[in-house]
Amino acid sequence: MKRNKEKKEIVVIMPAYNAEKTLAKTYKAIPKNIINEIILVDDGSHDKTVSIAKKLKIKTYIHPQNRGYGGNQKTSYMLALNEGAQIIIMIHPDYQYDATLITELIRPIQDKHFDIMLGSRIRTRREALKGGMPLYKYIANRFLTTIENIILGQNHSEYHTGFRAYNRKVLLKLPFHKFSDDFVFDQEFLISAVYSGFKIDEIPVPTRYFPEASSINFKRSVKYGLETLFALLKYILASLNIYKSNIFSKN
């Protein structure tokens, strides 16, 4: 893939799938004064996501067939790197996250204090539930996050957010093309990042759950939880020099 000659410092990527009802609101909330490019990758939507994206003049790429949430991000990050992005922001186009907070999200990366920033919806239980997060999702989120903190030696309030920012060097080093094409991609990314020594921090963001926002069902949530625990097992084995999974290999 040829690199764009015009360097785009800050790029937002939006992995989209059937986001016609929320895309415009998410896009309008993005602070355009600090963003050099917005890229949407549509993962085989069956609605008007692509036509709405084009009306909004968003740079849009289309997967003819659904490649999965992780597969969508792989394409998105390659496109952002090709644009010359130094900071890449990933936000779900489902309006579940407050895009107006992008400035605060990326500032620690710009100041070279951290390599990865997360937008956490879990500041307090009351705020999360008041924002519409289903109780079972809150409990599962807290359970997995607690285990991840213990095993990874971190202290984050949430690992399961769809609002993140990365320094370019993170994407260049991590073998993200070897991560899962499914939802556990996000967890393999962070677990691999911790293994590679990248510094991660977070800012609080409001919790916004509503009917139009994307959300995986209970069955998929259970699968995601089990796959997250398996990824943590891979981290333990790699840390003990017993077995090194390809998610920890060099890019």
Image (cartoon, rainbow, N blue to C red):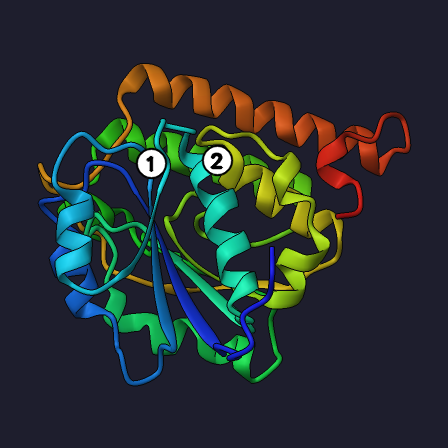
- The percent coordinates of residue 119 (x first, y second) are 38, 59
Q: Residue at x 33, y 36 (%)?
A: 43
- The percent coordinates of residue 20 (x first, y second) are 12, 44
Q: Residue at x 60, y 55 (%)?
A: 1
Task: From the viewer's perspective, tell me whether residue 244 is left or right of residue 129.
Answer: right
Q: Which residue is mark 2?
A: 71
Q: Residue at x 82, y 34 (%)?
A: 238
Q: Residue at x 37, y 49 (%)?
A: 162
Q: How many numbered callouts?
A: 2
Q: Residues within 10 Å of mark 1 (few under 14, many from 20)?
A: many
Closer to us: 95 or 139: 95
Closer to us: 94 or 119: 94
Q: Is residue 179 above or below residue 9?
A: above
Q: Which residue is mark 1?
A: 43
Of mark 2 and mark 1, the one earlier in the sequence is 1
Quadrant of the rendered image containing residue 183: top left
Q: Is residue 16 above or below residue 6?
A: above
* Residue 58 visible: yes
